[in-house]
Image: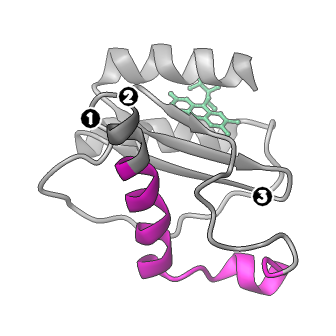
Amino acid sequence: MSGILLQARQANKRDGITGALICRRDIYLQLLEGPEKAVRAAYARIRQDDRHLELRLHVTEPVAQRLFGNWAMLHDPAKSLIWSPEELTDTRRAALFPAELRRVFDRLAAVAHGAR
Ligand SMILES: Cc1cc2nc3c(=O)[nH]c(=O)nc-3n(C[C@H](O)[C@H](O)[C@H](O)COP(=O)(O)O)c2cc1C
């Protein structure tokens, strides 16, 4: 994990990308923000990476403001997740609602900003 974060943060600093990675044994949730071209390129690299089993793109959208502008990749050990492992069945995991995902990252951003 620390290797992934080190590599991600280095590349993200270079590319003007910020974001957050929430990790739990059953799911990783990542938010990437930055210039569209750079974010798409990072996503393409992550797709190629064999350190994950299954990758799914849930939301892509233009945003007026970054949530994690101060973090090349904030790491959260899943404290922000709103689902228990039991709730995250395969079917559920495959179709997380954009509003739920926003809630998770909004909560994490609020905590992160408060903690600084
Ligand atoms: C869970 C996970 C998250 C990652 N997040 C990023 C990221 O935010 N930015 C990034 O550039 N690479 C990220 N990577 C690493 C990329 O998959 C890739 O190893 C890295 O960008 C170097 O690619 P390259 O060897 O083609 O240059 C992540 C990998 C994993 C497994």
Q: Are marks 2 and 3 in contact (CB under 8 Å)?
A: no
How many numbered discs? 3
Q: Residues within 10 Å of mark 3 (few under 14, many from 20)?
A: few
Q: Which mark is residue 71?
A: 2
Q: In what quadrant of the picture does the N terminus appear?
A: top right
Q: In what quadrant of the picture does the C terminus appear?
A: top left
Q: Is residue 100 magenta?
A: yes
Q: SS for tag 1?
A: loop
Q: Position of residue 81 (x, y in %)?
A: 63, 63
Q: Position of residue 40 (x, y in %)?
A: 39, 45
**What separation in Å lies between label 1 and label 3 (alpha carbons)?**
27 Å
Q: Quadrant of residue 99?
A: bottom left
* Vertical arrangement, residue 16 with respect to residue 102, above or below: above
* Disc 2 versus disc 3: nearer the observer: 2
The residue where tag 1 is placed is 69
Q: Nearer the viewer, residue 26 or 47?
A: 26
Q: SS for tag 3?
A: loop
Q: Is residue 72 magenta?
A: no
* Vertical arrangement, residue 14 with respect to residue 30, above or below: above
The residue where tag 3 is placed is 54
| Amino acid type, callout 1 | Gly
The residue at the point 68 percent across, 51 percent down is: 78
**Magenta-highlighted residues:** 87-110
**What separation in Å lies between label 2 and label 3 (alpha carbons)?**
25 Å
Q: Are marks 1 and 2 in contact (CB under 8 Å)?
A: yes
